[in-house]
Amino acid sequence: MATCPECDAEIEIDDDDLEDLQVGDAFECADCGSALRIATLDPLEFDIDDDEDEDDEEDDEEEAEGDDDLDDLDDDEDDAEDDNWDE
């Protein structure tokens, strides 16, 4: 029986499912929801999936960059409106 490295909850996997698992496969802890990866099969051990965290950070950075682009568009529209008032 394996445990979650994040919350120490016991992770139960059916014997039939164990046959299909490979080292590096993604897994999610049913108790805490942490993204895990299979570290070893015998004994079955899990590591926290650092790649999942990096993907989330990249998504957050891309969203922040997208927001900056929208701000630039708003500024351009404001400048155009200011030009119309000068006439």
Image: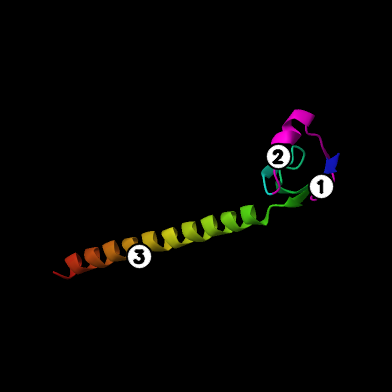
45 up-or-down from 17: above or below: below
Residue ID for mark 3: 72
The reply to whether the magenta stretch includes residue 16 is yes
Identify the residue at image location x=33%, y=61%.
74
Identify the magenta region.
4-23
Query: What mark, if any, has residue 21 been given in the picture?
Result: 2
Alpha-carbon distance for marks 2 and 3? 48 Å
Which quarter of the figure is the C terminus placed in? bottom left
Task: State the scheme by which the image is colored.
Answer: rainbow
Alpha-carbon distance for marks 3 and 1? 44 Å
Q: Is residue 31 among what the camera can see?
A: yes
Residue ID for mark 1: 7
Residue 54 point in image, percent of width and height: 60, 58
Residue 75 point in image, percent of width and height: 33, 65
Going by the image, does 78 lie left or right of 48?
left
Residue 21 point in image, percent of width and height: 70, 39
Sequence-wise first label, 2 or 1: 1
Asked which quadrant contains residue 51, the reply is bottom right
Q: Amino acid at mark 1?
A: Cys
Alpha-carbon distance for marks 2 and 1? 22 Å
Q: Secondary structure at mark 3?
A: helix
Q: Secondary structure at mark 1?
A: loop
Q: Amino acid at mark 3?
A: Asp
